[in-house]
Amino acid sequence: MADIDIKKMKTRKCRCLDCGNEFKGVGRRVICPSCQSDNVECEG
Amino acid sequence: MRRLGGTLEFKINEDEILFVEAGGLLGVIPSRRERTIFMNTAEDEVALFLEPRDLIVISAFRADDKMRRGIKALAYLLLETGNPLVVLPEDHPGSRRLKMVVSAADRVRLSCDITPGTHPDHHLLCSAPALSGMEIVSVDGGVELLNAPPGIRVWREVLDW
């Protein structure tokens, strides 16, 4: 129910430097969805 | 409500949703805080990180009491339970059954010229034709409606959850 084509979104691959969780994200203020840490590294 | 030229400005309190009706029905909720909404496809997951200034806009293609309650129910699922958005691939047979779509950004433009569930820019939201061309812009304490069509009906309701 989102009005988007998720494959065309400018997502960034991110990795949490605290828990190692890897995820794709969109937005300026990125936090780890698993442990809520902002110690996150993103590509691009 | 405050009118500034062709722009309408509305306050939205902390516990409120703003409804905008003209052919279709929109529900507008300021994020107010940082939050994460997950979008899921069959193969992938994307976390959408919202800021306090962002708006969550839910667009229903019909304007009646069922849709009004449906918008509030969808807002509850997204904002209170953390339920993810399910994203269908292009030309999925289920797309034609969608009654509501969601956009989240600090500025959302409505268009009836796109197919529901297919647009890559998450600030562009499919709407009923009467609302097409209107923009919803986040401002301190509420929203501005730019290019609002004549005969528009706008009201606030408490999110009593």
Image (cartoon, coloured by chain):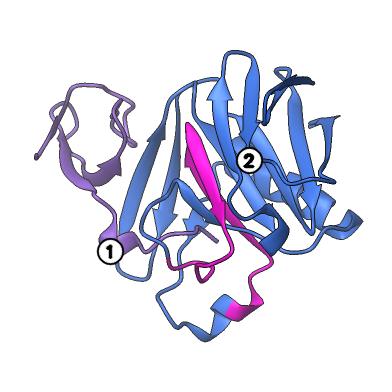
Chain colours: A purple, B blue
Residue at coordinates 47% horizontally, 31% vertically from top-left?
A: B106
Q: Which residue is mark 2?
A: B147
Q: Nearer the viewer, residue B118 or B150?
A: B150
> Quick one: SS at disc 1?
helix
Which residues make up the magenta segment?
A: B96-118
Q: Amino acid at mark 2?
A: Asn
- Give the crowd class for mark 1: few <14, some 14-19, many >=20 residues within 10 Å: few
Q: Is residue B44 left or right of residue B122?
A: left
Residue at coordinates 63% horizontally, 27% vertically from top-left?
A: B144
Residue B148, percent across and down? 69, 41
Q: Residue furthest right?
A: B65
Compared with B116, B80 (above or below) is above
Q: Residue furthest top?
A: B140
**Distance of mark 1 from mark 2, alpha carbons?**
31 Å
Residue B9, percent across and down? 69, 23
Q: Which mark is residue B125?
A: none
Can residue B31 be seen by looking at this rendering?
Answer: no
State which quadrant residue B63 falls in.
bottom right
State which quadrant residue B90 falls in.
bottom left
Q: Amino acid at mark 1?
A: Lys
Compared with B121, A28 (above or below) is above
Locate the C terminus of chain B by quadrant.
top right
